[in-house]
Amino acid sequence: MLDFISPHISGTLPFIYRGLQLTIFITFAGFFFGFIIGALTGLMRLSNNKIIYGIATVYIELVRGTPILVQALFLYFGISDVVGINFSAVTAGIIAISINAGAYIAEIVRGGVESIDKGQREAGRSIGLSSSQTMRYIIWPQAFRRMIPPLGNQFIISLKDTSIFAIISLNEVTYLMRQYVSTTASPFVPYIMLCLAYLVITIPAMVILRRVERKLDV
C-alpha cells in the first residue's frame, strides 16, 4: 500500500506548490478588486437616486443569479468572440473573482451600513459633519467591524471558487492536479492531496477569522 501511495505523494507536491501560488495570487488580487467594486456598489444601493440604485441592483442580481463558471467562460471565450479582446486565463480568473465577489460584498456592505442605528447619522449631522463625513468618520468604521466576519467567509468562498477556473486551463492547483492524474491514470491519492492542499489554506484562515471576531466582539 505504501509503495502505491508514496510515489504519488512525492509526485503531486511540486504540482501543489506551483498551483497554490497561482491560486492564492488570484484569490487575493480578485478579492482586493472585488472589495473595491463591492464597497462602491453597496453604497450605490443605499443611494436615493433611482438610476444609481438601479445600476447597482442590476449588477448585483445579474452576477448573483448566474454561476461563476458561466461568468468565467463568458470572459475567456465570449468576449473575445464578440469584441476581439483576448484575456489570458489569469486575467479572466481575476476579473471573474472580482466581479463575482464584488456582488456579494456589495450586499455585505449594504447590510453593514444599514445595521448602524440612524441616530448615528443624526448625531454626525448635529455636530456639523456633512453626509460624506458622517459616513467616513462615524458610520463606516462601525459598519466595517460588523462586515469582517462575512467578508472573511466570502474570501474563503472566493478561494474555493478558483478551482472552477480549471475549465479555462488556468494553471491553478486543481488544473495542475488534473494534469497529473491524466498522465498517471491514478486519481485516488492525487485528489486526496488536492483536498488537503485546500484545507491547509482554508482551516488557518477560518481560525484567524474566529480570533478576529472574538477580539472585535462582532
Image (cartoon, grey):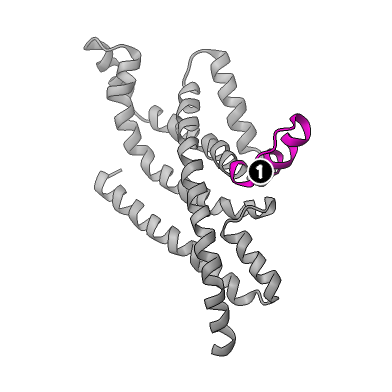
Quadrant assignment, res 19: bottom right
- Tag 1 residue: 72
Instruction: Residue 1: tell me if it is visible.
Output: no
Q: Position of residue 65 (x, y in %)?
A: 65, 38
Q: Position of residue 124 (x, y in %)?
A: 26, 16
What residue sits 30% from the left and 49% below the top? 212
The stretch in magenta equals 73-91
Q: Position of residue 56 (x, y in %)?
A: 56, 24
Could you tell me which quadrant the C terminus lies in?
A: top left
Q: Is residue 108 above or below residue 199?
A: above
Examine the residues drawn in magenta and state their main secondary structure: helix
What's under tag 1, amino acid-wise?
Ala
Q: Is residue 67 above or below residue 197?
A: above
Could you tell me which quadrant the N terminus lies in?
A: bottom right
What residue sits 61% from the left and 66% below the top? 177
Position of 58 with respect to 20 (left or right) is: right
Instruction: Residue 199: tell me if it is visible.
Output: yes
Q: Position of residue 155 (x, y in %)?
A: 46, 47
Position of 185 with respect to 5 (left or right) is: right
What residue sits 51% from the left and 41% below the top? 30
Membership of 181 in magenta stretch: no
Of helix, strand and loop, which one carries label 1?
helix
Residue 84 or residue 141, whichever sits in front: 84
Quadrant assignment, res 147: top left
Residue 18 or residue 52, whichever sits in front: 18
Residue 36 or residue 45, whichever sits in front: 36
What residue sits 30% from the left and 30% below the top? 141
Position of 72 with respect to 48 (left or right) is: right
